[in-house]
Image (cartoon, rainbow, N blue to C red):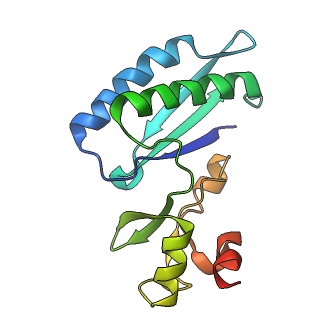
Amino acid sequence: MKQVFLFPFGKVINDKEQNRIKEAFEEFACQWKDHGEQVHMQLEFPYSSLLLIKAWKNSGGRIDGCAQDQLFRFVKQLGDHLQLPLLRFDLIPVIENQSVKFYTLIELRKNLQIGKISPQTPIVLFSVRKEEEWEQMPVPLKETAIYKQLIE
């Protein structure tokens, strides 16, 4: 089973930036363990605006909280170093014209009210944790818990 971790870049990143991120993760991946078991990972850059990490262990077990903490500490350091908002989960990825735009909840509400986006507008949820859930992304805004917050 592959677990999924998704982080926002807050912008489109170029190939040079993607390569720097890959290099940093290669070093991290060599020492990423969960209770002594090696954690393997695969990086993807959906829309060149998101960092998607698919992670798994050979045993097939779930990646423990301590190993997840290691990942999040590393991602925070990397984001600080590269000046990318990798832990800004308040930046909601909205798909517009095959690219991602990031909105805060307030901006999303305003754009929904003025008709810039609609209930059908696709968004990506950071709450996905399994590869199967990621394969369902993006989803229409109206099918999310975020939508209920926007129309209240």
Q: Position of residue 66 (x, y in %)?
A: 73, 22
Please state if 56 lies on the left or on the right of 8 as rendered: right
Q: Is 62 rendered above or below residue 130? A: above
Examine the rendering and report whether any part of residue 70 can be seen: yes
Please state if 137 lies on the left or on the right of 101 as rendered: right
Which quarter of the image is occupied by the N terminus? top right
Please state if 146 lies on the left or on the right of 35 as rendered: left
Of residues 25 and 40, the one drawn nearer to the viewer in this rendering: 25
Examine the rendering and report whether any part of residue 59 can be seen: no
Q: Is 68 rendered above or below residue 107? A: above
Q: How many marks?
A: 0
Of residues 101 and 105, the one drawn nearer to the viewer in this rendering: 105
Q: Position of residue 30 (x, y in %)?
A: 51, 12
Which quarter of the image is occupied by the C terminus? bottom right
What residue is drawn where x is 34% and y is 53%? 11
Q: Position of residue 117 (x, y in %)?
A: 46, 83
